[in-house]
Amino acid sequence: MRRLSYPLCVTAMALLVTTGAEARDYGQHGAVWPVIEPDLLQQIKARLTYLEASGETARLNDELKRRTIARVNRPAPVAGLTLAATLRRWSFDPTITVDADITDDKGRTIITRGTRVNPLDTVPLRGPLVFLDGDDRAQVDWAMARFGATQAKFILVGGAPLELMKARQRRFYFDQGGKLTQHFSIRAVPAVVEQQGRALLVTEQPPRTARRS
């Protein structure tokens, strides 16, 4: 009879012990809850139903309407601007570099990438752009006296454009978020942007009677 070597004997004994071992129940440790996934849509529907029944929806709609009308009548003033105290004038080059090919409706390239384009070559500025604070009556009077008979566009950086349109019988625009004043590097008003050849002339010049209301 062939004798098993020592390592094989140890392995065989381990297998026998494992095979004969019994499974044990160690019981329950800690509380266990079933997994419940709430229906988000049902929760939203229930919340909306409650808000409508309580009148909260109507109140919120009225508040939104009121705020919207208020923003239209008097937009947030452009921050960081001051009243022009001294004359400041500079030239602004509107030329841009095209960063991608521009094609027509048939896919034909009109302007290639990297081309420098001056918008004034095709779309000239019809009239001056006049930036002013609509809450400063002196600025509005100055603008009307100097540019009232021209095609100038009056662009407010503060004030109530609809109210001024009614009172002055002229269209007023608003520089929402200060995009235009930032684009032209305007720091004070009143300021005027006028075309001068293939460039724009920007002037900050206080009217003689200009003052803060």
Image (cartoon, rainbow, N blue to C red):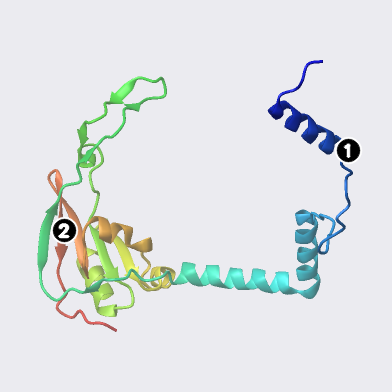
- Disc 2 packing (10 Å; few <14; some 14–19; many ≥20): many
Camera-side mark, 1 or 2: 1
Rendering quarter of residue 179? bottom left
Of mark 1 and mark 2, the one earlier in the sequence is: 1
Cα–Cα span, label 1 and label 2: 97 Å
Q: Residue at x 68, y 74 (%)?
A: 59
* Dot 1 and dot 2 residues touching (CB under 8 Å): no
Residue 173 appears anywhere in the view: no
Say which of 182 and 88 sits in front: 182
Q: Residue at x 78, y 75 (%)?
A: 54
Q: Where does the image place residue 107, in percent across and percent down from the top left?
A: 39, 20
- Disc 1 packing (10 Å; few <14; some 14–19; many ≥20): few
Q: Which residue lies furthest to the top in this view?
A: 1
Quadrant of the drawing holding the C terminus: bottom left
Q: Where does the image place residue 71, in percent across and percent down from the top left?
A: 48, 69
| Residue of label 1 | 20
Say which of 43 and 183 sits in front: 43
Residue type at the position of mark 1 = Gly
Kind of element beneath mark 1: loop
| Residue of label 2 | 202
Q: Where does the image place residue 67, in percent across and percent down from the top left?
A: 54, 71
Quadrant of the drawing holding the N terminus: top right
Q: Which residue lies furthest to the front in this view?
A: 1
Q: Where does the image place residue 138, in percent across and percent down from the top left?
A: 24, 79
- Whether 186 is drawn above or below 210: the answer is above
Rendering quarter of residue 12? top right
Residue 212 is tagged as none
Question: In the drawing, does residue 201 fall left or right of residue 139?
Answer: left
Residue type at the position of mark 2 = Val
